[in-house]
Image: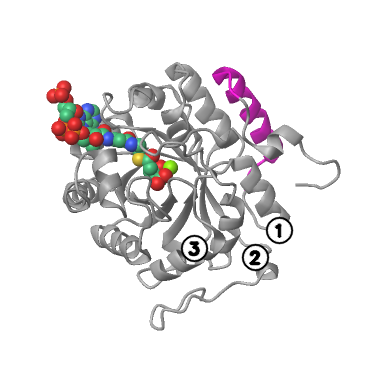
């Protein structure tokens, strides 16, 4: 077992032991990525992105979000995006839902899974969803109950787990408390978000170790933005604690509209290169993913943030 909930000590997995293990990638590009891009894409192009990502082997794709269009205009057409995709068997197309209104819209659009998002920082909660952490949990109680009735799985997020743009330091206990509350509501997995990308491997180790006192490694995911260039190292720190679910965004798209200066999630291509280099199993065709990465950057007219996409695959590495 990668963690021991009783003693509070998180065991570390040796690098050599990672070989052959499966990793689940949750692709964030169409949601966390595009929600923060200034260029507005049509719903057809967004759906094309989702289809290309699925064709490259990604099986979990956050396809859009059903939040207030006044708050996040980039996601106003998520229902059209869902209507425009060609569903591949085995792929889960999910959506963010902040409240019942969002949940109902997501169900109507055909989302396979929904996600609720809480924060470990009170100030960030107010800026992001206009309510306290406590109020957000109350809203999610309703969403989770409705999702349970409808047989729809719910994922949870905890933002600002490694620091907050308004509050500064965030105690690991506050992150763990949010994890506990989201699990108690029935979330099957909680993604730990370094929203502003300030975390370092030691901090990630400490925060995740604390979270592992609340739940098992299999129910936690890593969601690292790469603002300070630490995301890949942070992912390794999480893998060594036994976590095996990673959020990432093709081409490193995005940022966070309520976290000034935050860059996108770690680029999916770079994560896949890392994982394949460790001998881990992702099911993703990296070459196809790189093609998609260049394609979406040309649609957006933006610089690609993925080092792997920019460099191209090295000859004869078989990655
Ligand atoms: P509010 O203004 O307090 O809501 O916003 P309200 O209930 O008072 O409603 C105000 C208006 O919004 C009403 O319309 C509602 O109908 C409408 P009006 O009567 O004025 O015409 N409304 C909605 N419309 C469509 N869909 C809905 C919805 N709900 C209300 N679901 C609210 C509260 C939560 C809605 C708002 O603050 C919001 O939408 N926030 C979303 C912010 C967001 O999407 N942030 C980015 C995602 S989080 C993230 O990126 C972090 C993450 O990646 C992890 C990490 O990196 O840490 C997940
Ligand atoms: Mg994010």
Left or right: residue 223 compared with residue 119: right
Which residue appears farthest toward the bottom when viewing the image? 7
For ligand 1, tell me if the residue under mark 3 lies within 8 Å. Answer: no
At horizontal 28% and vertical 32% (from top left) the residue drawn is 67
- SS category of the residue bearing label 3: helix
Q: Determine which of the numbered discs, if any, sits on residue 279 in the image.
A: 1
Magenta residues? 283-302
Q: Which residue is mark 3?
A: 203
Q: Earlier in the sequence, mark 2 or mark 1?
A: 2
The correct choice, above or below, for 297 with respect to 164 in the image is: above
Query: Magenta segment: does it hold 216?
Result: no
> Which of the marked residues, 3 or 1, is nearer the chain's N terminus?
3
The reply to whether dot 2 and dot 1 touch (C-beta < 8 Å) is yes
Q: Are marks 3 and 1 in contact (CB under 8 Å)?
A: no
Are there few (<14), some (14-19), or many (20+) residues within 10 Å of tag 1? some
N-terminal of the two: label 2 or label 3? Answer: 2
Tell me the chief SS of the magenta region. Answer: helix
Determine the quadrant in which ligand 2 lies. top left
Residue 22 seen in this snapshot: no
- On the image, the x and y values in percent for residue 188 come to 35, 57
């Amino acid at each position: 077992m990668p963690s021991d909930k009783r003693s509070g000590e998180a065991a570390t997995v040796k690098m050599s032991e990672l070989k052959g293990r499966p990793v689940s990638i949750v692709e964030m590009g169409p949601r966390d990525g595009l929600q923060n891009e200034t260029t507005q894409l049509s719903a057809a192009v967004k759906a094309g992105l989702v289809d290309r990502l699925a064709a490259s082997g990604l099986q979990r794709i956050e396809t859009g979000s059903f939040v207030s269009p006044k708050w996040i205009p980039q996601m106003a057409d998520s229902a059209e995006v869902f209507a425009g995709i060609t569903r591949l068997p085995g792929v889960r197309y999910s959506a963010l839902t902040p409240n019942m209104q969002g949940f109902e819209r997501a169900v109507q659009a055909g989302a396979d899974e929904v996600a609720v998002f809480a924060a470990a920082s009170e100030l960030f909660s107010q800026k992001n969803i206009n309510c306290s952490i406590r109020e957000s949990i109350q809203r999610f109680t309703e969403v989770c109950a409705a999702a349970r009735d409808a047989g729809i799985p719910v994922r949870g997020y905890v933002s600002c787990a490694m620091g907050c743009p308004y509050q500064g330091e965030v105690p690991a206990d506050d992150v763990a408390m949010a994890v506990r509350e989201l699990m108690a509501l029935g979330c099957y997995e909680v993604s730990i978000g370094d929203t502003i990308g300030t975390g370092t491997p030691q901090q990630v180790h400490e925060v995740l170790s604390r979270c592992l006192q609340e739940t098992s490694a299999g129910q936690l995911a890593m969601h690292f933005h790469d603002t300070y260039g630490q995301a890949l190292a942070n992912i390794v720190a999480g893998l060594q604690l036994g976590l095996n679910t990673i959020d990432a965004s093709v081409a490193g798209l995005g940022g966070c509209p309520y976290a000034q200066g935050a860059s996108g999630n770690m680029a999916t291509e770079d994560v896949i290169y890392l994982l394949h280099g460790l001998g881990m199993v992702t099911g993703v065709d990296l070459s196809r993913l790189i093609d998609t990465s260049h394609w979406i950057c040309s649609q957006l007219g933006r610089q690609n943030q993925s080092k792997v996409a920019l460099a191209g695959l090295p000859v004869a590495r078989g990655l």
